[in-house]
Image: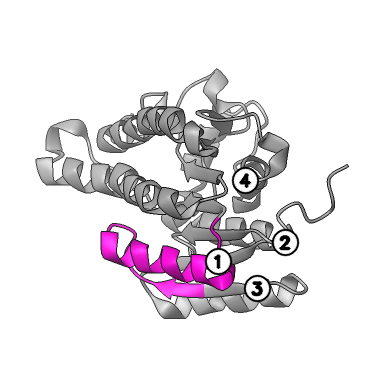
Amino acid sequence: MMSGRPLEEMTALVTGGSGGIGSACARALAADGARVVIMGRRAEPLEAVRSQVLAEVAGAQIEIAVGDGGSEEDVKQALSKAHGLAGRLDIVVPTVGGSGFNPFLTTSVEDLRRDLDLNITTAFIAMQQAAPLMTSGGSIVCISSTAATMPFPALATYCAGKAGLEALIRTVADELAALNIRVNAVRPGLTRSNATTDMFANPAIIERFLEQTPLKRTGEPEDIAEAVRYLASPASSWVTGQSFAVDGGQELRRNPDLLG
């Protein structure tokens, strides 16, 4: 029988750790017993997340690492800090990503390169830098999107980024299996976060999403964190190379056309 703290003695790094999904993941991993380092570009929001986790999770060990998820050197330093907590690294959750809405015909090549970097390069760096430190194996859990599998008007570059991320995950999972490192992703539908604040402030947009969501609600960061904690834990020890939709059933339908 698995204990109530299945990640006891394990160490995790969460990039994008001050965001809604990143902070929820950090809280869930800490609640399951992991030591956690959260990484982000600004110290103040990271400290706020750290204080909140310490207040909510008895005995939590959580530290911050200030840096850019797109910088190999910054990620290397954050991973080193995580590994240094107890001489091990077991879990990596790269949550950095994003995009801006823009119709395809007015999207620039610079927009494309930005979104590929945000959604693929950041995960590539985290996985490549982390693997040599995961000497006892472990789990890498990336954050994808339903945009990886369903067209989304005005988000062509984001769709390309998340689809590319999932292709990367499958190949990396195949290669790193020899090191007993599992690589998976969670594929959220529309979820409340810092990046979706404007969308949630517009009831008409939310209603259009709900029309395409069988369970008739939008996601909360905790919905995604619950899937991450499963994929990070020994409960998913025979799962790798997968991307799980956590979307209220939206993939049964489609993304709304917000240009229409």
Dot 4 corresponds to which residue?
232
Question: Taking 93 as reference, is 55 left or right?
Answer: right
* Left or right: where 167 falls relative to 178: left
Q: Is residue 227 visible?
A: yes
Quadrant location of the C terminus?
A: top left
Q: Count neighbours of disc 2 (C-alpha within 10 A) and say few if under 14, some if 14 to 19, many if 20 or more.
A: many
Element marked by disc 3: loop
Instruction: Name the residue beneath numbered marker 2.
Output: 33
Q: Earlier in the sequence, mark 3 or mark 2?
A: 2
Task: Determine the secondary structure under disc 2.
Answer: loop
1 or 2: mark nearer the eye: 1
Q: What number is the disc on residue 61?
A: 3
> Callout 2, which amino acid?
Gly
The percent position of residue 193, horizontal first and vertical second, equals 50, 55
Q: Is residue 148 above or below residue 186?
A: above
Relative side of 6 to 207, left or right: right
Q: Residue at x 62, y 49 (%)?
A: 225
- Alpha carbon separation for disc pair 4 and 1: 19 Å
Which residues lie in the magenta part?
64-89
Label 1: which residue? Answer: 87
Q: Secondary structure at mark 4?
A: helix
Residue 208 or 245: which is nearer the viewer? 245
Is 78 inside the magenta-drawn segment? Answer: yes
